[in-house]
Image (cartoon, helix red, strand yellow):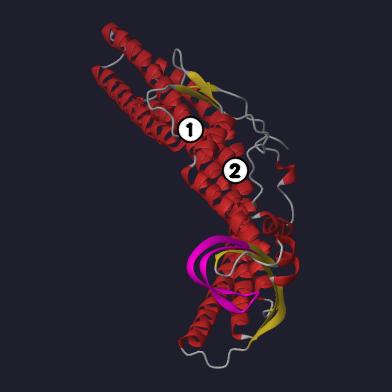
Amino acid sequence: MGLLLSTVMAFAQEGSKILTFDDAIKIALKNGVLLNQQKNNLDLAVMQRNFNIAGLGPTLGFNAYAQRAAGNSFVQQTGKLAEGITDNTGASLNANINLFNGFSQVNRVKQSLSALDAQLFYVNRTEQDIMNTVATQYLQVLLDIELLKIANENWEALKKQLIQIKEQVNLGAKSQVDEYNQDSQAKAAEIRSLTAQVNLVNDRALLTMTLLLDPNEEFNVVKPTWNLNTADRNEDFELLFDTALKNRADYLRAVKNEESAKYGMKAIRASMLPTLSMYASGFTAYNYFYGTAGPNQYTFTEQLKTVNLKKWAGFNLNIPILGGSQNFQNRTNYVLQKATYLNNQIIRRNTEIQVKTDVKKAHEIYRLYLKRVLATIDQLNAAELALQLETERYTLGVTSFVEYANANRVLVQAQTDKAQAENLLLFQKVILDYAMGTLKPDGFQ
């Protein structure tokens, strides 16, 4: 069984543009403040990941200097002091690599990777939050338009009926009371029309503000042509729940935040373990003397390659035994990170329950709204037939105005119920996809 809701132009104004539901979603995703902020934070998370990955490799540095000294200088080649001017140039190359630090950097890399995934899921869920909000407001505007249309049609019908009753009163076929009652009904319909217009203005302004559109720019909205077929909405609940756990970005973000906190805890714990690193350095220099020492007896090449060349290599072992406040600070940081990890576990379990609740509620309500739409169709058919018969009876004078007014009220209520039911069914489709985590900008069909 399927229900295809056709496209309806609404709230038309001369010179105004058409704002489709897809266009509204695209504009909201482009202008969303929170979404753009989280995208900036995503760039930061990428840089943090790259920084930690680079920390796994060795460090390599080059240093060079050039100077001139006047006065007494120590001549390295002769082992004597000389008075005069000395030109010195030199360079060094230094390398260092971490051999063991309790896998601190490895865990920091894993922590940053999990944090990056968590931020990606946050961006994804923020997009879905925006789509859900826009869907709520857009479909509410559509409902307001439909309710305004119903109110205006009812008002026009009652005004025409008032004209007929006035003519009948003038002919003596109806009493003056009937005219007053009909006039009261018409005024009440006018009030409902004005109230519907107020609701439309308010909800339309809210949608404009959400999309960050120019308030002076008029636009028309159209009802989406979504095929609300129930064939794909009767799956087993456990299957729906498993699908939601694989797609709900807020749950996946909670999982990644838990992982990130766990790796962060391990990285901090490594600061209390011994570390071992290896280093190597090379240095060379060239000196030239002016004064009592005379020119350097070694050539430029001899100084660089032999006389002034030095090389170092070794290992550096650090074992924390008693470091005072630093050791206690490391332990405090570890306890703080552990508390963060445990709290993220709680958040993840709570999010899992929330996902299960959302899916169950959305799925059951969706099926009920389908039944509600079918019921309102039958309700409207019955109300239209009842009003038709009651109008004929009232015209012939075989029924009272009260019964006729009640039939008209029942018809208006049936029209309103049907419009609301269709709108709720449209929105519940979005709610179900939102609860499943499968809501996508190009997924509205």
Where is residue 309 shown, x and y percent of the image?
71, 70
Where is residue 137 shown, x and y percent of the image?
47, 38
The mark found on residue 430 in the picture is: 2
The answer to whether one can see residue 420 in this image is no
- Comparing 339 with 294, the one in front is 294
Q: Please check the rendered image and state whether residue 72 is part of the magenta-colored stretch, yes or no.
A: yes
Amino acid beneath label 2:
Val
Q: Nearer the viewer, mark 1 or mark 2?
A: 2
- Comparing 54 with 123, the one in front is 54
Q: Residue at x 56, y 72 (%)?
A: 346
Relative to 237, say whether 408 is above or below: above
- Comparing 151 with 318, the one in front is 318
The mark found on residue 135 in the picture is: none
The residue identified by callout 1 is 143
Where is residue 329 shown, x and y percent of the image?
48, 83
What main secondary structure does the magenta stretch of the protein show?
strand
The answer to whether one can see residue 5 in this image is yes
Amino acid beneath label 1:
Leu
